[in-house]
Amino acid sequence: MQLSTEIPTITDVLEARKVISKYLNRTPLLYNHILSKQLSAEVYVKYENYLPTNAFKVRGGINLVSKLKQQQTVITASTGNHAQSIAYASKLFGVHAIVVMPENANPVKVEATKSHGAEVIFHGTDFDEAREFVELTARDKGYRYIHSANEPLLISGVGTLALEILEDLPRVDVIISPVGGGSGASGACIVAKALKPNVKVIGAQSEKAPAAYKSWKSGSLVSDKMETFAEGLATRVGFDLTQRILREYLDDFVLVSDDEIRRAMIAMIEATHSLCEAAGATPLAAANKIKEELKGKNVAFVLSGGNISLKQLGDLLLRSSG
């Protein structure tokens, strides 16, 4: 079963919620006094790290895999959160999942993926090398390849988080989402522009992995370096479907340094008393760069995931105290 690459609509997101709500609890959107004072804005945090895989992508995984036949074999590539999403959903619906991860993948995400019953294969030094291997394997074996971004059902699934934001905070002015492949920001764009067009959706990405940003800026798919420590943002290329959505609807796109992301991780952990991986802290890093634009506004940060290993956390704390 190969799905189309048509841009999802708000109807698709509403349909996705009917499926997802059977399996996932709504995540909280909470006002944060510390971040609000820091930014001179009204800041709310959307805690996607409260989901069973501790990351937002499981919304899309459940929406997509629920449509597949039992005993079908799917294969995908991921640095971690998408891997857990597909593994979790596949176990839920009786689908055999093969996940290819880079050789240096976050061990927390690797073990979590295995715990959901997926077969894990290591290949390549980064996400894109793993993805290229998966594409070849899927063609050779006839497996259903699940792309991490070019899948309408993944995008409409993760779009449900923005639907929850708009319902819980109707006066929201700005939603800031991290961007790796771009499914989360794309879903937010589809929902916001359909239900409340004056809401600004802003993407945030590491300047050490700027392919999505440069693809959005140039209007064509761009390949670039991938040197960031933030595995959730670590892509070398822009992807067709998400880029078509972002070019149409994204209001702004902010690049931040890895050091700015690290400082934002510390600030998010301190302010939320919740684990926050690098991608999940990127909205704060971006907000710090556009602080004047956000002053006095109602701003929602997508804390996309909390899958940080003890080693990563230790290294982060050592850097912050050095």
Image: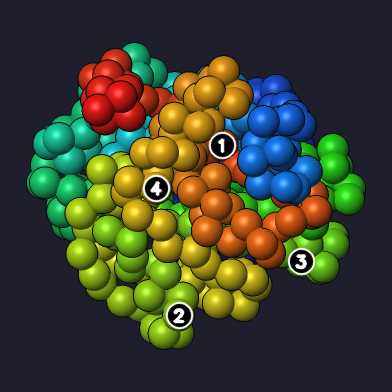
**4 vs 1, front mark:** 4
Q: CA distance from mark 2 to mark 4?
A: 22 Å
Q: CA distance from mark 3 to mark 1?
A: 21 Å
Specify the amino acid type for callout 1.
Leu
Q: Is residue 320 left or right of residue 191?
A: left
Name which residue lies at 45% across and 80% down: 217
Mark earlier in primary sequence (2, 4): 2
Dot 4: few (<14), some (14–19), or many (≥20) neighbours within 10 Å?
some
**Disc 3, SS:** helix
Outermost residue to the front: 322
Residue 196, image quadrant? bottom right
Look at mark 3 in the image and give the residue it sits on.
193
Specify the amino acid type for callout 3.
Lys
Residue 46 versus residue 275 in the image, above or below: below
Mark number, residue 260: 4
**Disc 2, SS:** helix
Q: Nearer the viewer, residue 51 or 2?
A: 51
Look at mark 1 in the image and give the residue it sits on.
303
Q: Nearer the viewer, residue 308 or 256?
A: 256
